[in-house]
Image (tube, rainbow, N blue to C red):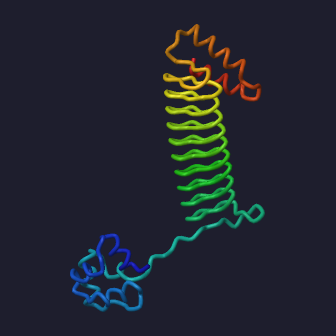
Amino acid sequence: MTNIEILRMADHLSIPALARQTGIDPNRLLLLEEGRAQPDETETAALCRVFCLEPEELTGRLRCLENWDSPWRIGSWPLLSAGPDARGIVAVGIKSCGVISAGIVSRGVISLGCFTMGGFSLGMFSMGLLSIGCFSLGLASLGLICAGLIAVGNLAVGIWSFGLLAFGLGCSVAAEPLGLNPVSLELPAAMKAAAFQRIYEQTPGLFRSLIACLLRLFS
């Protein structure tokens, strides 16, 4: 992709529209865009006038971004990788995959970004064992809208759910609780404590410590 094509698309100009503004024949413009011809002085001046550029900024091609990998490796994985499609122990890029990854789309044991998936994921849309985000799905999830075994959020759906509006099969603790064992946060303290004790006793031992922390938080 040549710079002329990038500039034309950035200004939302069609080939005929650019031809009218520069006085260059449309077929000639196509050759210039494809890099099969170089603009002469008159064409360069016309294009620079339209795009408000210096002549040296007009020619050339867009250089594609490439991944950078560190020379230090663990097995076949670089210790650090950065770029549009990064893969490494620590990966940073548009799309990243690694033990620790950060990017618009990231996957890893610890993943950060917009769309994330991993053991611990933090992002606008997240999925993982522990996920935090606006929209989260996981074993334990925290967010505005979340679903999981344990869900905490404005709208929470799960086995144990906590939030403003919650639907749970094990318990629902919220301002507007739905599902089984609903507990309203507006209940008197004594009634709420009794309900929390009942929920704690019905919780399997593996999850009791985490559920106890959440119950204390919402008490």
Q: In this view, does 91 lie to the left or right of 61?
A: right
In front: 116, or 54? 116
Q: Which residue lies furthest to the front in this view?
A: 179
- The residue sitting at 57% across, 18% down in the picture is 183
- The residue sitting at 52% across, 18% down in the picture is 185
Residue 187: % across, % down = 52, 12
Determine whether 209 is above or below 187 in the image. below
Residue 32: % across, % down = 36, 87
Q: Quadrant of residue 51?
A: bottom left
- The residue sitting at 67% across, 45% down in the picture is 119
Quadrant of the image containing the C terminus: top right
- The residue sitting at 71% across, 25% down in the picture is 209
Determine whether 208 is above or below 150 in the image. above
Q: In this view, does 93 lie to the left or right of 8?
A: right
Residue 215: % across, % down = 62, 21
In front: 132, or 90? 132
Q: In this view, does 2 lie to the left or right of 165?
A: left
Determine whether 88 is above or below 2 in the image. above
